[in-house]
Amino acid sequence: MGGFSIWHWLIVLLIVVMVFGTKKLRNMGGDLGGAVKGFKDGMKDGGQPPEDEKPVVAASQVSNAQAKATSERNTIDVEARQKP
């Protein structure tokens, strides 16, 4: 554990618990565990959703996506400048 003794680490742990509280630390641990589990599942599946669980897209969603894509192609991004 580097150049620190066990007493140094216990004091650091005590300060962290006092600052964050046990409930917040427990929630952060649960969130971290869920993220790691999701990452492992994603790596195992290869990042592809199963064939029987592919999302169904409604016709209105397709037309909205097409309209958005069309409007984005016609948008010109410029930078506004002030006159000196």
Image (tube, rainbow, N blue to C red):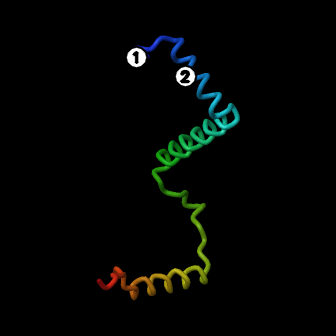
State how far apart marks 2 and 1 are (Cα). Answer: 14 Å
The number of discs equals 2
Circle 1 — which element?
Answer: loop
Q: Residues within 10 Å of mark 1 (few under 14, many from 20)?
A: few
Residue positioned 49% across, 84% down in the render: 66
Closest to the observer: 35 or 62? 35
Instruction: Looking at the image, tell me whether mark 2 or mark 1 is earlier in sequence order.
Output: 1
Circle 2 — which element?
Answer: helix
Three-letter amino acid code at the position of disc 2: Val
Is mark 2 in CB contact (under 8 Å) with mark 1?
A: no
Q: Quadrant of residue 80?
A: bottom left
Is residue 77 shown left or right of residue 63? left
Residue positioned 61% across, 39% down in the render: 28
Q: Is residue 2 above or below residue 68?
A: above
Closest to the observer: 52 or 78? 78
Residue positioned 36% across, 85% down in the render: 76
Q: Mark on residue 2?
A: 1
Residue positioned 57% across, 18% down in the render: 11
Three-letter amino acid code at the position of disc 1: Gly
Where is residue 47 drawn, in percent x and y?
A: 47, 53
Q: Mark on residue 81?
A: none
Closest to the observer: 83 or 22? 83
Where is residue 7 drawn, in percent x and y?
A: 54, 12
Quadrant assignment for the C terminus? bottom left
Where is residue 63 drawn, in percent x and y?
A: 55, 85
Quadrant assignment for the N terminus? top left
